[in-house]
Image (cartoon, helix red, strand yellow):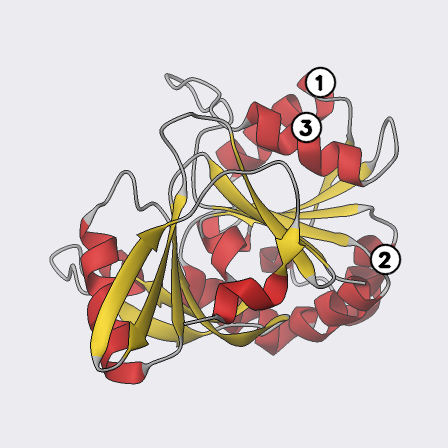
């Protein structure tokens, strides 16, 4: 059973910031159908940042009532313990950061395969930024900027492919509006469907249905596709009801 909530971006209480995604995060918790679900935080993309881990435990634990644990792959944990922690959880929440390094580490440790088995067992797969795009076939990423701050290019990355359908996804659209232009350029060249998610907007997928949910009236998403030689971009509508997932792929 496919349960994915991909959040384009937003704060959850880092020092000096406001909480921006609470209504989305409460929807994730409601999806678990448990009052105090077990949430496993994967901080790989941030290099297992202790500060990030503390924020997640405070927010999802003390504020939202989850039983929170974290899986730090930098500690050399073995695959048996990785699988034990993942399968004992109701919600897998993936943090933001360097998508390229995150996926590389997941593949090296075997976590990518464990996550697929967890997805097949109905665990909720969710996250923000890198933790949103990783579930799709491809993302358009600025990962090179982590190695060279002067490199502001956007490049395609092969992701986990849990959501099939030739989608290339990009986060942070409302905060980094150049991303939509770069996504349109990429779809013009490579084809398929592009999806640009604003901060404070999430794509919720349940099996073969989807909807957009948002914690801000200004946040939404954009669908990009090529038809009759021209690239089209349409702003998607926030609606409470679910639609057929196949509608994301239409042209």
Q: What residue appears at the point 19 percent right and 71 percent down from the top-left corner?
A: 185
Q: Does 76 sit above or below residue 227?
A: above
Secondary element type, mark 2:
helix
Q: What residue appears at the point 47 percent right and 70 percent down from the top-left corner?
A: 250
| Residue under pointer 1 | 62
User: In the image, which disc is placed on residue 196?
Assistant: none
Secondary element type, mark 1:
helix
Based on the displayed image, in which of its 4 quarters is residue 27 positioned? top right
Disc 3 residue crowd, few under 14, some 14–19, many 20+, Cα 10 Å: few
Name the spot of residue 148 as percent of width and height, x first: 18, 61
For the residues labelled 1 and 2, the Cα–Cα distance comes to 23 Å
Q: Are marks 1 and 2 in contact (CB under 8 Å)?
A: no
Camera-side residue: 208 or 85?
208
| Residue under pointer 2 | 87
Q: What residue appears at the point 18 percent right and 65 percent down from the top-left corner?
A: 153
Side of 215 where 244 appears, left or right: right
Count of numbered marks: 3
Based on the displayed image, in which of its 4 quarters is residue 67 positioned? top right
Secondary element type, mark 3:
helix
Name the spot of residue 113 as percent of width and height, x first: 71, 75
Camera-side residue: 25 or 229?
229
Disc 1 residue crowd, few under 14, some 14–19, many 20+, Cα 10 Å: few
| Residue under pointer 3 | 26
């Amino acid at each position: 059973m496919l349960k994915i909530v991909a959040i384009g971006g937003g704060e959850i209480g880092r020092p000096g910031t406001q909480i921006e995604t609470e209504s989305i995060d409460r929807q994730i918790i409601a999806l678990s159908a448990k009052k105090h679900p077990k949430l496993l935080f994967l901080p790989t993309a941030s290099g297992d940042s202790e500060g990030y881990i503390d924020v997640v435990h405070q927010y999802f634990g003390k504020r939202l009532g989850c039983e929170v644990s974290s899986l730090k792959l930098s500690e050399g944990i073995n695959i048996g313990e990785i699988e034990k922690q993942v399968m004992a959880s109701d919600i897998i929440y993936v943090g933001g950061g360097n998508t390229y390094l995150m996926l590389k580490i997941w593949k090296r440790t075997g976590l990518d395969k464990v996550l697929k088995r967890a997805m097949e067992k109905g665990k909720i797969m969710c996250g923000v930024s890198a933790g949103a795009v990783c579930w799709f076939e491809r993302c358009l990423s600025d990962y090179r900027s982590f190695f060279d701050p002067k490199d502001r290019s956007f490049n395609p990355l092969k992701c986990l492919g849990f959501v099939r359908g030739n989608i290339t996804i990009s986060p942070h659209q409302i905060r980094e509006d150049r991303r939509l232009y770069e996504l349109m350029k990429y779809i013009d060249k490579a084809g398929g469907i592009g999806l640009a998610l604003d901060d404070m907007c999430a794509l919720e997928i349940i099996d073969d249905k989807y909807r957009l949910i948002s914690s801000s009236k200004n946040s939404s998403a954009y669908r990009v596709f090529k038809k009759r030689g021209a690239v089209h971009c349409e702003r998607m509508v926030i609606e409470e009801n679910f639609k057929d997932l196949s509608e994301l792929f239409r042209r």
